[in-house]
Amino acid sequence: MRFFSAVTNTGDERGREKPSRRNIIKGAGLAVGGLAVGAAGGAAAVAAVPDGTPKSAMAIPVAGPWRPAHGHVDVTWSVDTSQKLVALTFDDGPMPNWTGMVHDILDAEKAKATFFMVGERAVANAKIIHGRMDRHEAGNHTWAHKDMSRLTHAEAVDAIHRAHKAIAQITGKEPRHLRPPFGQLGGTTMSAAGQLGYDLTLWGIKMLEKTYENHPQGLVDYIVNNVTPGTIVLAHDHGNPDRLVALRNLSKMIQGLRAKGFEFVTVSELVAASGPPAQAPQKPSRSPSPLTGH
């Protein structure tokens, strides 16, 4: 995954100048009453698609020439690394009570996390996160948490762009990663992310709150025993009451993972640490038998 030089450079990007994410967002073609999408202005329909294909499945938004901001969009579930790094992520906030609880725990444990914020909730609850995001990362979880696999390209661009502006203004940090609500991917999700210069971040393991609602230690053990180097963990700072079993036991999870040597980093830091995974030992080859040749 590659970032803009104005935000973060990985090793293969040093010395190369790229447009800033802010300039890409500003140049996305948002206009009163509509969105300009690509060289054809969004007026042309994509040709030769099967009848009945929903607009949300269209990975190419126009019939004419088109390319995303970087020519590609990366999707990350986890990161290949031999370092014992793990990224905690929290979706759906910020919301009263929930988000403050998470921040209190992370402060007490001195752990970092990435918060995938819903734009309209960030606007409504800006005071909750004021002054609390210094070491954490802000991610984009769209404006209103709608299923992006059902949106048109223009609707998906609007959902990402509105949230981007709000989150950047409130936190002082421009989001670098998009997590589509419910983890739902569609062609227009990809094309909209590409137009706005985003990559997509999913997860490798999530809190199974319903499964362990009445067995908190089981949830702690499940997370601690299944996190591996490069894992992205999905949790929530908003939702049904059963999700509180994860938050109330978050300290135990952090302490359990630290006891195994894990360090907590943001998603961007995890991606920057990407490298070849540890190689599994190779089985020794069997020498041919001097008698049979096999």
Image: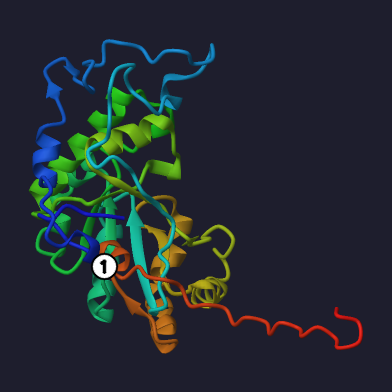
Image-quadrant location for residue 37 = top left
Q: Position of residue 221 (x, y in %)?
A: 54, 77
Residue at 86% from the left image edge and 80% from the top image edge: 293
Asked if residue 162 lies left or right of residue 105, the reply is left
Residue at 31% from the left image edge and 63% from the top image edge: 271
| Residue 171 drawn above or below residue 188 | below
What amino acid is found at the position of numbered circle 1 in the picture? Glu
- Inspect this view and state whether residue 74 appears: yes
Residue at 40% from the left image edge and 29% from the top image edge: 59
Kindly state the secondary structure of the residue where label 1 is placed: helix
Q: Position of residue 175 (x, y in %)?
A: 20, 50
User: Residue 161 versus residue 285: which sits nearer the camera?
Assistant: 285
Residue under pointer 1: 269
Quadrant where the image shows the N terminus? bottom left
Q: Tally the numbered discs.
A: 1
Indicate how the structure is coloured in the image. rainbow
Residue at 33% from the left image edge and 23% from the top image edge: 61
User: Residue 208 versus residue 294: which sits nearer the camera?
Assistant: 294
Please, which residue is most extreme toward the right here? 291
Asked if residue 259 lies left or right of residue 30, the reply is right
Q: Position of residue 226 (x, y in %)?
A: 53, 72
Quadrant where the image shows the C terminus? bottom right
- Inspect this view and state whether residue 146 appears: no
Crowding near pointer 1: few (<14 within 10 Å), some, many (20+)? some
User: Residue 136 versus residue 187: which sits nearer the camera?
Assistant: 187
| Residue 255 drawn above or below residue 24 | below
User: Residue 55 versus residue 96: which sits nearer the camera?
Assistant: 55
